[in-house]
Image (cartoon, rainbow, N blue to C red):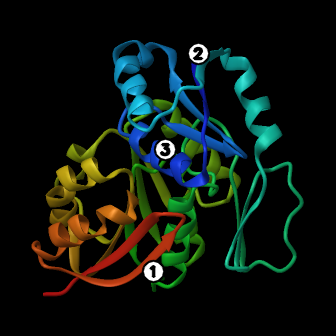
Amino acid sequence: MNYIELNISVPSAEIAEILTAELSELPFDSFTAEKGMLKAYIPQDSLVECKGEADAILAQYGIAEYRYVQIEAQNWNALWESNFEPVDVDGRVLIRAPFHTPSPTAEFEIVIMPKMSFGTGHHATTKMMVELILGMDVAGKKGLDMGSGTGVLAIAACKRGATAVDAVDIDDFAYENCAENIVTNGVEHLITPLLGDSRLLEGRKYDFILANINRNILLADMDNYLKCLNPQGDILFSGFLDEDVAMMTSAATSRGLTLTSECHTSGWAALRFTLVE
């Protein structure tokens, strides 16, 4: 599969974050940010149908300097390896690639091969979700990682004592990458990768749910998630901006969820709700 890299000259980190949120509503599935530059990645075939929308988003925010560059599939891993740095979460968890030096002090490590799947820990939403997981009691519980990407959140939950996690993603490459990463982290007996969408959830039950996707999908699928959540269960949402918190909280509380904790970083938010019955 060939990918297109959209190089965007951005005036500030704030605009880069906003554009990441806006473009993630389209089939762009990975982002990297450097000083003055945002890079967004999308399958070449997917760009054909949404290029006009992407251009309109950039125009809306006054972006005049950008270009689309084709990247051959065989060069992707080298590109990621050259940019991927370990991610420290509160001094307790290190998210790193296999080619990085292990940490002697972290409570645990998550080893992720940086490929095309979302969830290397670099994005604020992934890091905040791990922070919220660290504050939860998941030991002995069964969970769902919805929109699992690399499987990083499912792996974090299992490293914290979860005994079973279903990792669901609609992208076949994410599914394959997750399957690789759970073996690397020694949790393949605890995590089940599943290829598909929320329709796979029918008849399943979970003690906790992790959903780091985007606002529109979270709102559209929230009822499906809640049908799967056991009483007193926790559900973590992220993938949206601070300005969307009121909307997300209203949607959740109207369905019987209670907000129990939250994180905010660089304009992004992550919310933890509990189903109190």
Res 144 visible = no
- Closest to the observer, 142 or 115: 115
Q: Amino acid at mark 2?
A: Asn
Foreground pick, 246 / 272: 246
- The CA distance from mark 1 to mark 2 is 39 Å
Secondary structure of the residue carrying tag 3 is helix
**Sequence-first disc among 1 and 3:** 3
Looking at the rendered structure, the kind of residue marked 3 is: Thr
Front tag of 1 and 2: 2
Residue appearing at x 56%, y 61% in the figure: 124
Chain-order first, disc 1 or disc 2: 2
For mark 3, does the 10 Å Cα neighbourhood hold few (<14), some (14 to 19), or many (20 or more) residues?
many
State whether residue 24 appears in this view.
Answer: yes
State the image coordinates of residue 118 (x, y, percent, origin top left): 54, 45
Q: Quadrant of the C terminus?
A: bottom left
The circle drawn on residue 2 is: 2
Say which residue appears at 38% left-offset and 57% top-offset. Answer: 240
- Residue 1 location (% of width, % of height): 56, 16
